Image (tube, rainbow, N blue to C red):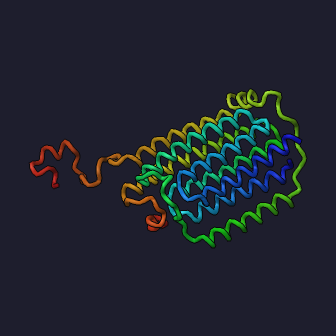
Amino acid sequence: MFTSIAFWLLAVIAVVSGAAVFRVDSMARATYALAVSFVAVGAILLLFDLDYVGVITILMMMMEMAIMGVFMIMFMGMNPALMPMDMVHSKKASAAVSLSVFVMLSALALLIPWPSRRGSPDGDVTAALGEALMESKMLVMLVISSILFATIVASLVLANPGGRYGQASDGAIGGKQRARHPDGGGK
Amino acid sequence: MTLEGVLIVVAALFCVGLYGALSQQAIVMVMMGLELMLNGVILAVAAFWWFLAPAPEGQVLLLVVIAAMTVEMAMGFAVATLVHRSRGSDMTDMAGDLSG
């Protein structure tokens, strides 16, 4: 009974704060609303006995929202909490598509004859996850680790102003060669 | 609390995120929409784990989804930084020519 009440309370918080992300009038408030939505979903995971994943979700998303706030201020160039925001396009078409997808997904959720539960959770769910990661599912983590490393490299290459081969405005001649040219490498 | 009930909540979260991803102009706001959609996916995987098959594989799948969120954020911010630097704007409408 308590679990049901807590779930529906958290579900309402998650959906309402998720909707508030696109309703509030500043990006800072939108970030806070998204953080609340993530915390509510993380708390629902805790209700499902997913202690480790729930805590990871909450901690990671709070950190992510903080980084998002930094980027927002960087791009907007002013205090985002003070800036009214109405930057939308195709509002009606987007709402129609979203509503149609919601109706379709809800109908599928209600109409599919879901099978009954197979088995029961291990006594220590976190220990079972750790054993799976270190044994049968280690390949999954190895693949993810290489993807994350590739993401770090790709993000740095994209975000670096000079890029891999230096500034595009410098042309094809490198710095050392340019120093030898009296005219500064054609500039 | 039933699987169907949780999945309707998932559908609501996913569709709110979809609306944001389709309608917002600022790249950061589009990414917020995508994050919200993945938030729904996390809840769906957790619900399937709890109501259908509470095996460790489900938890591993959850970690994969969380890793996908991380990759999406990192690459999204890198691309947003690049677009902002080269075009002086972080709006999707200013980068319409990238659609192909």
Residue B85, image x, y percentages? 37, 54
Which one is nearer the viewer's eye here, B100 or A86? A86
Which one is nearer the viewer's eye here, A82 or A135? A82
Is residue B52 in sight in this rendering?
no
Q: Residue at x 58, y 71 (%)?
A: A90
Which one is nearer the viewer's eye here, B96 or B5? B5
Asked where in the image residue B4 lies, by quadrant, the reply is: bottom right
Residue A163, image x, y percentages? 35, 48
Horizontal side of residue A49 vs A97, given as left or right = right
Which one is nearer the viewer's eye here, A33 or B66? A33
Q: Is residue A135 above or below residue B53?
A: above
Residue B77, image x, y percentages? 48, 50
Q: Is residue A73 above or below residue A88?
A: above
Q: Residue at x 74, y 57 (%)?
A: B11
Residue B22, image x, y percentages? 59, 64
Horizontal side of residue A142 vs B10, given as left or right = left
Total number of numbered labels?
A: 0
> Which residue of the protein is positioned furthest toward the front in this rendering?
A82
Instruction: Point out the image quarter for the C terminus of chain A.
Output: bottom left
Q: Residue at x 63, y 72 (%)?
A: A93
Q: Is residue B76 above or below residue B87?
A: above
Horizontal side of residue A78 vs A103, given as left or right = left
Q: Is residue A53 above or below residue B9?
A: above
Instruction: Point out the image quarter for the N terminus of chain A.
Output: top right
Is residue A134 in sight in this rendering?
yes
